[in-house]
């Protein structure tokens, strides 16, 4: 079978295209030089290995000899994995969104040989349909325009790039942060809230955990119960829906409808990490065991299906999988997860299957009435249609079906290890280890061990301690690609979370080294942090200003630096965080809903710091009381050895708890009963 240059790459996405007849090249100088020497445009195709519509476009177009002929003759075709190079992806996605009004993957962009974009879009069918131009015709038209109107195209590309640079500029603003931004963000969420199904806006619905982070902290700061209840309802309804894998755990990427029922079936590590934290916080706030069990469900899925044997975490599982093992090349979205009514009867027995079907909304002819994909015909997506009356019975049913499902062809696993996504997952496990301590110590130990093993994996495989340098990706024994802002910021955050889990000061030492390197590599003297270091292959150097499916690097950095400053007493970290907040002040004042995670950092800064010091050899009961509560503005120290809190001592040989604000402490207490009332409020 013929191969192209992608066969030498490590990216699972690029390797998926290594046998296309298209003469793909990886992003890099060799491809750019070829475009300059041939004096032809670049066709840049951007996606990721678990993307459903990326697979569709490959089958329809990139496996077509006719399409390959046009691409190879008139263009230099380049494939890019957006998860490996988010900096490049963001530049051209900004262009596509600005020129078409929407974005997504696969992303298709035509560039001049000096990398300036002049035409773009997302998925193109091979022939005109869905209101989209046909890819074959589009290639012919762009090639003709390049030959007849090149000067116009090149001039237009330069003008568009200047406009994008002006639009994306952040920093140097005279604006000051206005406290009204918090209320404005909350008001915007309240106005778009779906009071029936939870979530915000209509279909399709994405989880966007950064919004839940904001709502929980806004509730904690303001006492507004509506903010809490919006987040709790959203999480409760998501857990009931088909977007939640009712058998194997974890969450799919998003729901195509407004009730979390029909999912887009890929599973991403960053979703699992952020949603696990949201469910843990919901449990701390509400005390309802449902939320803790969903968090457990996420953790167990990640440990079972996304964990490298040495401790790191893989990136994602695909939406598509083989429908019928006898036809291994025919794949369908969600095939691994859906069931016919007959399969339930065969596996569970008629009576038990009937009860299971009622609870999980299964019908004889399938439960997807508006069938978006032919593979759903006659099949059922499991969702919680009715309350369970016999949890033990359904647990056995789940076990039987999960065992049967495990014998189906699994979806493709993207087994690259990404620093920022792993760091988010480390933070989640560190938080889980704390929250589960009081009611499931065995699970807490599992989650603690998972967090520390993943941290060790990243430090050993993706960090150069001599140069204080991180790498973005590890796969198959190779680390590569200089890390980006979100990698550094998320790893600083993870180090602080690990410190709060263990009180091992070495984590703060590494957090400081990473924070120093982050500021050195990415800070703009005019304000804010760039998403990537300066590079010849970037036509724009952006500062990410949107908390979307993943939080923006600037938002994570601001929050992590403030917490690191609070724990270490190193004021320059706080000053750096305030520079970030001030750089984005105009954006926060005018469009606060774009940066809810950054507003979380600001709420931390606005809160008078509260310290809890536990002095003595038996702090566990006090820690259990602390960790069962949602206390986002409280810092915990156990037997501090230096600084103003180190003078705190046990009392009469008993562990003493000191609760302080701005380092002014109340009288110490030695029992949990005395301690708990002191935790009221923040």
Image (spheres, rainbow, N blue to C red):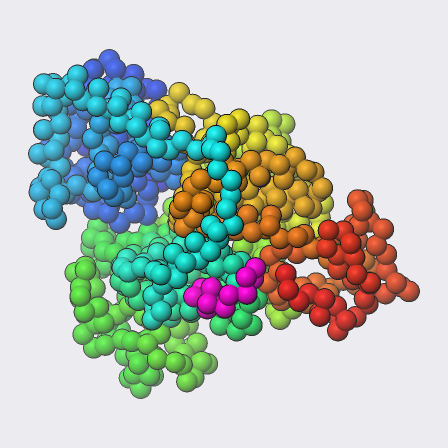
Residue at point 17%, 66% (across, down): 370
**Horizontal side of residue 319 vs 414, given as left or right:** left
**Horizontal side of residue 29 vs 471, given as left or right:** left
* Foreground residue among 251 and 312: 251
* Foreground residue among 326 and 501: 501
> Is residue 2 depicted above or below 31 in this figure?
below
* Foreground residue among 624 and 228: 228
Query: What's the magenta region?
Result: 220-231
**Quarter holding the N terminus?**
top left
Query: Quick check: is 228 in the magenta stretch?
Result: yes
* Foreground residue among 111 and 210: 210
**Is residue 239 among the parts visible in the rendering?**
no
Residue at point 40%, 20% (across, down): 536
Residue at point 19%, 59% (across, down): 373
User: Majority secondary structure of the magenta segment?
Assistant: helix
Provide residue 643's location: percent of width, then percent of height: 79, 44
Residue 196: name its quadrant: bottom left
Provide residue 646's location: percent of width, then percent of height: 82, 49
Query: Quick check: is 359 in the magenta stretch?
Result: no
């Amino acid at each position: 079978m013929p191969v192209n240059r992608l066969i030498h790459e490590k990216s699972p996405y690029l390797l998926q295209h290594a046998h296309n007849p298209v003469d793909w090249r990886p992003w890099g100088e060799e491809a750019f030089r070829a475009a300059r020497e041939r004096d032809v445009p670049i066709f840049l195709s951007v996606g990721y290995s678990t993307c459903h519509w990326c697979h569709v476009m490959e089958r329809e177009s990139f496996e077509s000899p006719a399409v390959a002929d046009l691409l190879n003759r008139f263009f230099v075709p380049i494939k890019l994995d957006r998860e490996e190079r988010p900096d490049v992806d963001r530049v051209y996605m900004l262009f596509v969104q600005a020129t078409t009004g929407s974005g997504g993957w696969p992303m298709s962009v035509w560039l001049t040989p000096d990398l300036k974009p002049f035409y773009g879009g997302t998925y193109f069918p091979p022939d005109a349909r869905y209101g989209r131009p046909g890819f074959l015709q589009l290639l012919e038209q762009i090639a003709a325009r390049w030959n007849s109107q090149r000067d116009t195209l090149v001039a237009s590309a330069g003008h568009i790039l200047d406009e994008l640079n002006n639009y994306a500029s952040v920093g140097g603003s005279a604006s000051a942060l206005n406290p009204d931004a918090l209320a404005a963000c909350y008001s915007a969420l309240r106005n778009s809230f779906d009071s029936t199904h939870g979530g915000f806006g209509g279909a399709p619905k994405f989880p966007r955990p950064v919004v839940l982070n904001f709502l929980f902290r806004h509730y904690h700061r303001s006492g507004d119960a509506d903010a809490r209840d919006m987040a709790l309802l959203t999480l409760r309804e998501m857990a009931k829906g088909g977007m939640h894998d009712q058998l194997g755990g974890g969450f799919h990427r998003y729901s195509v409808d407004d009730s979390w029922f029909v999912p887009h079936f890929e599973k991403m590590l960053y979703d699992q990490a952020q949603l696990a934290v949201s469910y843990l916080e919901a449990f701390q706030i509400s005390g309802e065991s449902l939320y803790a069990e969903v968090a457990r469900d996420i953790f167990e899925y990640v440990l079972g299906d996304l964990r490298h044997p040495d401790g790191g975490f893989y990136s994602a599982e695909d939406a598509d999988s083989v429908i019928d093992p006898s036809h291994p090349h025919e794949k369908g979205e969600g095939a691994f997860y859906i069931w016919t009514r007959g399969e339930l009867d065969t596996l569970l027995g008629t009576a038990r299957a009937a009860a299971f079907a009622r609870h999980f909304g299964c019908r004889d002819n399938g439960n997807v009435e508006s069938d978006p994909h032919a593979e759903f015909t006659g099949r059922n997506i499991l969702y919680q249609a009715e309350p369970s009356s016999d949890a033990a019975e359904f647990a056995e049913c789940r076990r039987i079906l999960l065992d049967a499902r495990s014998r189906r062809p699994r979806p493709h696993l993207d087994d690259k290890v990404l620093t920022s996504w792993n760091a988010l997952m480390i933070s989640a496990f560190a938080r889980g280890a704390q929250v589960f301590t009081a009611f499931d110590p065995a699970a807490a130990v599992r989650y603690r061990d998972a967090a520390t093993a993943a941290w060790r994996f990243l430090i050993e495989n993706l960090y150069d301690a001599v140069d204080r340098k991180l790498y973005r990706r590890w796969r198959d024994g190779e680390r590569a690609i200089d890390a980006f802002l979100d990698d550094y910021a998320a790893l600083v955050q993870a180090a602080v979370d690990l410190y709060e889990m263990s009180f091992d000061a070495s984590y703060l030492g590494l957090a400081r080294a990473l924070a120093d390197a982050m500021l050195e590599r990415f800070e703009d003297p005019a304000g804010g942090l760039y998403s990537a270091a300066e590079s010849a292959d970037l036509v724009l150097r952006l500062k990410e200003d949107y908390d979307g499916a993943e939080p923006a690097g600037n938002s994570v950095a601001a929050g992590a630096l403030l917490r690191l400053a609070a724990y270490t007493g190193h004021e320059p970290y706080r000053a750096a965080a305030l520079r970030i907040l001030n750089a984005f002040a105009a954006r926060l004042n005018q469009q606060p809903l774009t940066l809810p995670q950054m507003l979380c950092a600001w709420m931390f800064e606005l809160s008078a710091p509260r310290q809890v010091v536990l002095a003595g050899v038996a702090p566990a009961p006090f820690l259990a009381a602390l960790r069962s509560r949602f206390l986002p503005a409280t810092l915990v120290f156990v037997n501090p050895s230096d600084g103003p809190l180190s003078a705190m001592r046990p009392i009469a040989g008993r562990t003493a708890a000191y609760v302080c604000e701005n380092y002014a402490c109340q009288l110490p207490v030695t029992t949990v009963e005395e301690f708990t009332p002191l935790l009221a409020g923040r």
